[in-house]
Structure formats: C-alpha cells, structure tokens
Amino acid sequence: MVVGVCGGVAAFKAAALVSSLRREGASVSVVLTRSARRFVGEATFRALSGRPVLTSLWRGGDEPEPHVALGERAEAVVVAPVTAHTLAKLAWGLADDPVCAVVLATRAPVLLAPAMAEPMWLHPATQRNVQTLRGYGYRFVGPNFGRLASGREGWGRMAEPEEILEAVRGLLEPARSP
C-alpha cells in the first residue's frame, strides 16, 4: 500500500490513516510532496510506517527509480490529501513530484481524498479534472462539507481517516475475492 500526501492543513490526517492501515496489517510506504513536508514531517511518517519515506524523484540507494518501484509493488495507492494542484497534474499526466510519479507508475487501484477551499473544489477546471481522473478509473472519497482551514464551512474538507480506510477496504475487496 502506498499513501501519498500533498501539502495542506489536512496532511495531519494522513498520519492517522497510515497508523490505521498498519493496525489492519498493511505494509505502508509513504510518499510526500515538498509542500506536504511543510505540514507533517518525514520522521512522523517513517515512525508510523516503519519504512523509509520517499520525498524526491532523485533519491539514491538501491533503486534508480524508487517511484516506479513503489508504483509497481503497490496493492493500492491512496493520496490523502490531494490538492487541486495535484489533481490537475494527474489529469494532465505530469510527474514532476514523487506523489504524481508513483500514481502514474502504478497499475494498482488509486483512491484520491481531496482537500481544498470550497471555491477551488467547485471551480469548473477542478471538476473537469475530477471527471478526467474518474475516466481513468481513479476513485474518490470526499471531499465532505464541514469546517475548512479558513474557518469557513463548505465543501472541500478531507474525508476522515476512518472513511478513507473504509474506502480502501472497498477498493481492495474485489481484488481479494476468489
């Protein structure tokens, strides 16, 4: 299982998601965008996942293309939170950060949990990108209506970790059926 984390206040919820996935017995690899590291540190995800955290396309080590290797090994890829910016990059097939690169390199099911300000979520460009990604077979959980980082209420609040975990179970269920 790969959990990608993009920048945004909701990134702290990704830590709870990784912890929950581990309690369920999943082996979890975490991938962070540069912006995500401004909200939740690499050390947090390393401790919760028990694995190295991918933060760059250019990491050294045994694997020359760690983003491709993670994408190929993944049973599923969850991006939580996914920003409007990353939705646009994925819709256009851009892979200039480790999260987008892993998503584009995988054949596994992809689950996206958007989090952003309501005007960004409702913008026609974002909605077009969501439809494009659904056409690629990507699934979505949320966003929900609730209190946003701005203090306002509206659509754009990331789904809670328990809701994302339930969506992951649903995503993997058909693959586990005989």
Image: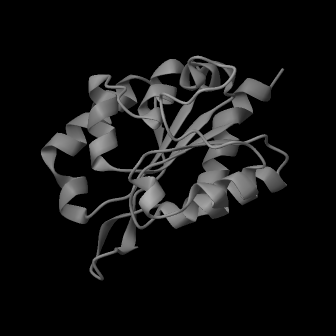
* Residue at x-position 44% and y-position 54%: 36
Viewport quadrant of the C terminus:
top right
Give x and y (percent) for residue 35. 38, 53
Q: Residue pushed farthest left?
A: 124
Q: Is residue 89 visible?
A: yes
Q: Is residue 31 above or below residue 48?
A: above
Give x and y (percent) for residue 90. 34, 31
Place residue 161 in its image quadrant.
Answer: bottom right
Q: Is residue 27 above or below residue 83?
A: above
Q: Is residue 72 above or below residue 167?
A: above
State the colouring used for the structure image.
one colour
Pick the front one: 97 or 150: 97
Q: Residue 104 vs residue 29: left or right?
A: left
Give x and y (percent) for residue 56. 48, 36
Place residue 171 in its image quadrant.
Answer: top right
Q: Residue pushed farthest bottom?
A: 151
Label total for image: 0
* Residue at x-position 38% and y-position 58%: 115
Q: Residue 156 vs residue 119: left or right?
A: right
Q: Residue pushed farthest front?
A: 60
Q: Is residue 154 above or below residue 93?
A: below
Pick the front one: 121 or 87: 87
Q: Is residue 162 visible?
A: no
Pick the front one: 171 or 99: 99
Give x and y (percent) for residue 15. 62, 61
Viewport quadrant of the N terminus:
top right
